[in-house]
């Protein structure tokens, strides 16, 4: 089961997925746990029987994969702590895998209660706008190709939208001239947050204009605009390009 079971919408939260593993004498044990996700997540700790253990972690927008250096075979209480933000209620079903038979993953049976399946987390609160919690990081950034802060991550969420609408992310200079269209797509409620290099869904800007050339150093405006029924919503944030 997972706890807490109810969190504030789009607030950073740490969830703990608790798994009780039982093995027969012929069991192959566990080497890998996969937790399916609906928003980007980052594993913080893994414990077995209350004690921290070593693990490897790979994240994608759809799942967290946790690997152990040694096979787990005795009955074990496994707890995975991870951080995320939720834009709506979400479930976190779990699979367990043995490296001896990786083609045969086993789904974990969730604990059930009067409230429903205990790997589901509900959300409370309603965002006032469809574009929520826009952040740009790092800011300033330095797209000079040295491998440090070469891109900036545009991090936000679209909330409370059932039917896909047009989303656009653009960069303007301080004269109001558009220098880059970073993204143009259709989306409904969706989490565009987290570093995409580590399993997140944020949008990257590499400091280049629409012609593929690096922009001059200075202050630019990133605009996230979304076509909604009342005529549209947009949010502007400044970003500094430095060399």
Image (spheres, helix red, strand yellow):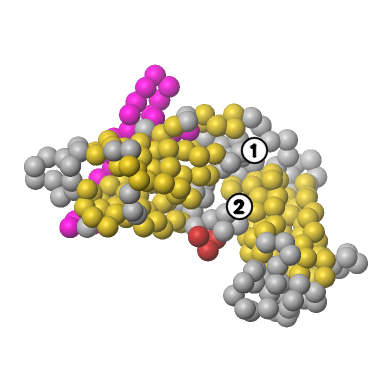
- Which residues make up the magenta segment? 100-121
Horizontal side of 37 relative to 139 (left or right) equals: left
Q: Is residue 238 visible?
A: yes
Mark 2, secondary structure of its residue: strand
Residue 41 place in picture, x, y as percent: 49, 49
In the rendered view of the protein, which quadrant contains the N terminus?
top left
Horizontal side of 230 relative to 145 (left or right) equals: right
Quarter-of-image position of residue 239: bottom right
Is 207 within the magenta?
A: no
Measured Cα–Cα span from mark 2 to mark 1: 14 Å
Residue 92 place in picture, x, y as percent: 41, 40
Q: Which residue is mark 2?
A: 192
Closest to the observer, 57 or 53: 53
Q: Which residue is mark 1?
A: 160
Q: Is residue 78 visible?
A: no
Query: What residue do we see at 40% from left, 25% from top?
Result: 116
Report the disc number at residue 148: none
Chief SS of the magenta region: loop
Query: What residue do we see at 36% from left, 57% from top?
Result: 56
Residue 110 place in picture, x, y as percent: 33, 33
């Amino acid at each position: 089961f997972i706890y807490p079971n109810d969190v504030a919408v789009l607030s950073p939260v740490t969830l703990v997925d608790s798994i009780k593993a039982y093995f027969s004498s012929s069991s192959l044990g566990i080497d890998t746990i996969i937790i399916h996700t609906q928003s980007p997540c980052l594993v913080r700790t893994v414990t077995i029987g209350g004690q921290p253990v070593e693990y490897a972690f790979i994240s994608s927008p759809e799942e967290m994969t946790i690997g152990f250096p040694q096979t787990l075979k005795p009955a074990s209480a496994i707890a995975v702590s991870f951080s995320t933000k939720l834009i709506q209620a979400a479930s976190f079903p779990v699979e367990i895998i043995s490296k001896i038979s990786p083609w045969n993953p086993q789904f974990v049976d969730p604990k059930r209660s009067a409230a429903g399946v205990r790997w589901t987390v509900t959300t409370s609160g309603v965002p006032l706008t469809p574009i929520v919690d826009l952040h740009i990081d790092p800011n300033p950034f330095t797209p000079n190709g040295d491998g440090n802060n070469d891109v900036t991550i545009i991090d936000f969420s679209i909330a409370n939208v059932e039917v896909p609408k047009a989303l656009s992310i653009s960069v303007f200079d301080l004269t109001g001239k558009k220098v880059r269209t970073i993204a143009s797509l259709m989306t409904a409620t969706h989490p565009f947050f987290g570093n995409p290099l580590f399993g997140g869904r944020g949008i990257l800007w590499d400091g280049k204009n629409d012609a593929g050339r690096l922009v001059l150093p200075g202050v630019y405006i990133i605009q996230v605009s979304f076509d909604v029924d009342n005529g549209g919503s947009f949010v502007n944030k400044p970003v500094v390009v430095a060399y």
